[in-house]
Amino acid sequence: MSAITTHVLDTSRGCPASGVLVVLEVGDDGGYREVGRGTTDGDGRQKGLLPPGERPLQGRYRLTFHTGAYYAALGCESFYPTVSILFEIRDPAQHHHVPLLLSPHGYTTYRGS
């Protein structure tokens, strides 16, 4: 399992959000550069954003969820075409889980375990 994972739950439908494209980027002096990507599985989880055994470095990271495409595939209009979550890794030895609770007109996130 990757050292950085996520889980997307569609609170408007009461189920996991499967098939959501997620892009992981790391911040550097020139902005951000992509280090991983994948889509959420049937349980709404993305466990492979970094290669197995690879530890992230200290620094700023950004997870971008392509939520507009997810809702469009369901035939539902969404206010947010993407949701980006910026976070900072201070201890690369820890596992970092960043869940997203999603609806067509709002979202919430938190530091998971």
Image (cartoon, rainbow, N blue to C red):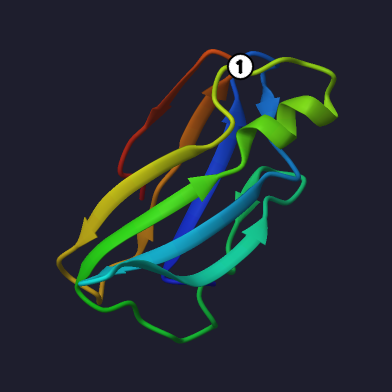
Q: Nearer the viewer, residue 80 or 13?
A: 80
- Tell me if mark 1 has few (under 14), some (14-19) or many (20+) residues whose alpha carbon lies within 10 angstroms of its own: some
Q: Is residue 107 above or below residue 41?
A: above
Furthest residue toward bottom:
53
Q: Position of residue 13 (x, y in %)?
A: 70, 16
Which residue does the image show at 83% across and 30% down from the upper left?
Answer: 73
**Is 50 positioned to the left or the right of 70 in the image?**
left
Furthest residue toward left:
90
Residue type, mark 1 in image? Pro
Q: Position of residue 49 (x, y in %)?
A: 54, 68
Q: How many marks?
A: 1
* Rendering quarter of residue 58: bottom left
Q: Quadrant of the N terminus?
A: bottom right
Q: Position of residue 22 (x, y in %)?
A: 58, 53
Which residue does the image show at 33% across and 77% down from the upper left?
Answer: 56
- As helix, strand or loop, the secondary structure at mark 1 comes to loop
Question: Label 1 belongs to which residue?
Answer: 104
Q: Position of residue 76 (x, y in %)?
A: 77, 16
Q: Is residue 65 above or below residue 106?
A: below
Q: Is residue 76 above or below residue 93?
A: above
Which residue does the image show at 46% across and 86% down from the upper left?
Answer: 53
Q: Is residue 49 visible?
A: no
Q: Is residue 1 visible?
A: yes
**Is 74 positioned to the left or the right of 37 in the image?**
right
* Rendering quarter of residue 39: bottom right
Q: Nearer the viewer, residue 22 or 47?
A: 22
**Is 73 positioned to the left or the right of 10 in the image?**
right
